[in-house]
């Protein structure tokens, strides 16, 4: 993944803040326009937003405008920390909104299905990655790293698609959400084993401690905090307090080695029983949907480095189908063995297949720890990018195609988070 420089016009350095705002505005404009085009084409809008980031990041500003006479021109969104914050906030608010749609009791009922699904969804791609890397001539430790990059699930893209298809609160939708949480925990523990990033026992204690803390605070305090916030005379005070809750939950999760999106999702879920749930949803959505969420998907696209994909060569053509088939197949098998019907287990398998930031983190850590060096390090990163890109493009298309062909939907509703 590649981050370009900031917009820098040599005689206007004092205006860098406004140039950054211009870049954010430009990114938002591209994301909205391409999202609308994809929506008109009956395709997931998020793919249009990702495509917008990819085009701007790899094509438009990689030479086309860099030769303007008298100015050195790049994009602000790729290294400016402010844009990174906007994009990160997008996925956090998105998962908070998803959590508001799901009741705690629903997720508990899906617990068995979710746990078995997560085991299958991690085990098969991990094994497939090890076998494939062994065929490349990699060592066992290197092979385990590749397998681990194929195992995580980034549920945000699936969640958006499920909402658009009105399938989030189905048995398969709830199974996916729960399985993604179990999957996250298992991959973190696996990472600690393979990379020796810390004591497994200590990591496990921190993870368990987080879930106990968020359950106690979420169940007994968050609904009361929300009601008190919306009872304040200060205009917008309740909404601001809910933004604080979302951010604090994400920060706490990340600090205790659980994904930030899991913290945000659980905070939203515990607030789904609040008497002011509708007000929370309305206020967070109005901010997140118009600004942060489109910028998140744009940022995803902007980080796709086409040169790294090209350098991976034939290995990339092999890893993409293996990673998709093993992840879908393993999750399908787990869901089916847990008791779901085949026509419920298949969308679960598809929905568990997107990978986003976690595989890249795993690859970078493997390089930092010296497991991969030189050309092998570049090859690992290129293959990881291929896994990520293929999954975020194919998952929403496959999910929409499945439900349309199965006759479970007659039209795709214009449904907003």
Image (cartoon, rainbow, N blue to C red):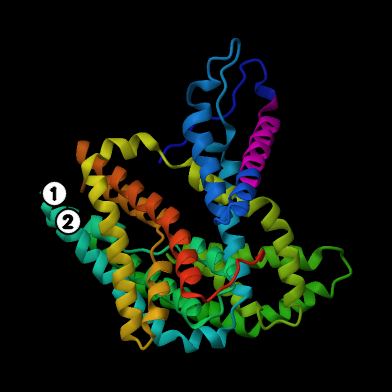
Q: Quadrant of residue 267?
A: bottom right
The rendered magenta stretch, by its main secondary structure, is classed as: helix
Q: Which residue is mark 1?
A: 136
Residue at 18% from the left image edge and 53% from the top image edge: 142
Q: Which residues are magenta?
A: 15-32
Q: Which residue is mark 2?
A: 132
Q: Is residue 360 above or below residue 198?
A: above
Q: Please tell me whether mark 2 sits on a helix, a strand or a loop.
A: helix
Residue 356 appears in the rendering: no
Q: Please tell me whether mark 1 sits on a helix, a strand or a loop.
A: loop
Whether residue 274 sits left or right of residue 297 in the image: it is right
Residue at 29% from the left image edge and 70% from the top image edge: 329
**Residue contact between numbered discs 2 and 1, judged by CB atoms under 8 Å:** yes
- Packing grade of label 1 (10 A; few <14, some 14-19, many >=20) is few
The stretch drawn in magenta includes residue 29: yes
Residue at 40% from the left image edge and 79% from the top image edge: 343
Q: How many marks?
A: 2
The image position of residue 410, as x and y in percent, is: 58, 72
- Packing grade of label 2 (10 A; few <14, some 14-19, many >=20) is some
Spatial CA span between label 2 and label 1: 7 Å
Residue at 24% from the left image edge and 60% from the top image edge: 147
The stretch drawn in magenta includes residue 90: no
Q: Quadrant of residue 200?
A: bottom left
The image position of residue 161, as x and y in percent, is: 54, 64
Q: Is residue 220 above or below residue 368?
A: below
């Amino acid at each position: 993944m590649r981050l370009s420089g900031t917009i820098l016009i040599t005689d206007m350095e004092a205006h860098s803040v406004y140039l950054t705002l211009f870049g954010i505005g430009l990114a938002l404009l591209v994301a909205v326009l391409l999202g609308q085009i994809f929506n008109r084409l009956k395709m997931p809008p998020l793919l249009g937003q990702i495509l917008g980031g990819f085009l701007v990041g790899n094509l438009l500003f990689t030479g086309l405008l860099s030769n303007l006479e008298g100015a050195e021109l790049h994009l602000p969104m790729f290294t400016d920390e402010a844009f990174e914050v906007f994009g990160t906030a997008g996925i956090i608010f998105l998962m908070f909104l998803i959590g508001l749609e799901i009741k705690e009791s629903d997720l508990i009922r899906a617990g068995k299905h979710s746990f078995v699904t997560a085991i299958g969804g991690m085990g098969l791609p991990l094994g497939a990655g090890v076998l494939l890397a062994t065929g490349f001539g990699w060592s066992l430790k290197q092979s385990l790293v590749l397998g681990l990059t194929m195992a995580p699930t980034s549920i945000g893209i699936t969640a958006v698609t499920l909402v658009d298809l009105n399938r989030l609160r189905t048995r398969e939708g709830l199974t996916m959400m729960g399985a993604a949480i179990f999957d996250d925990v298992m991959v973190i523990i696996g990472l600690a084993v393979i990379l020796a990033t810390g004591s497994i026992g200590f990591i496990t204690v921190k993870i368990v401690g987080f879930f106990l803390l968020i359950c106690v605070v979420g169940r007994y305090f968050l609904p009361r905090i929300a009601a008190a916030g919306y009872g304040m005379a200060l205009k917008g005070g309740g909404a601001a307090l809910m933004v604080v809750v979302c951010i604090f939950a994400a920060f706490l999760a990340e600090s205790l080695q659980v994904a930030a999106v899991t913290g945000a999702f659980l905070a939203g879920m515990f607030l789904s029983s609040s008497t002011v749930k509708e007000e929370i949803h309305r206020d967070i959505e109005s901010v997140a949907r118009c600004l942060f969420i489109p910028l998140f998907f744009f940022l995803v696209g902007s980080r796709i480095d086409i040169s790294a994909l090209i350098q991976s060569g034939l290995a990339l053509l092999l890893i993409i189908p293996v990673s998709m088939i093993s992840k879908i197949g393993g999750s399908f098998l787990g869901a089916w063995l847990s008791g779901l019907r085949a026509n419920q287990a298949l969308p679960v398998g598809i929905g568990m297949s997107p990978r986003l930031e976690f595989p890249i983190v795993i690859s970078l850590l493997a390089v930092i720890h010296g497991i991969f060096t030189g050309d092998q390090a570049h090859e690992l990163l290129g293959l990881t990018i291929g896994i990520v890109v293929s999954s975020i493009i194919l998952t929403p298309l496959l999910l929409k195609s499945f439900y349309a062909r199965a006759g479970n939907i007659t039209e795709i509703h214009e449904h907003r988070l």
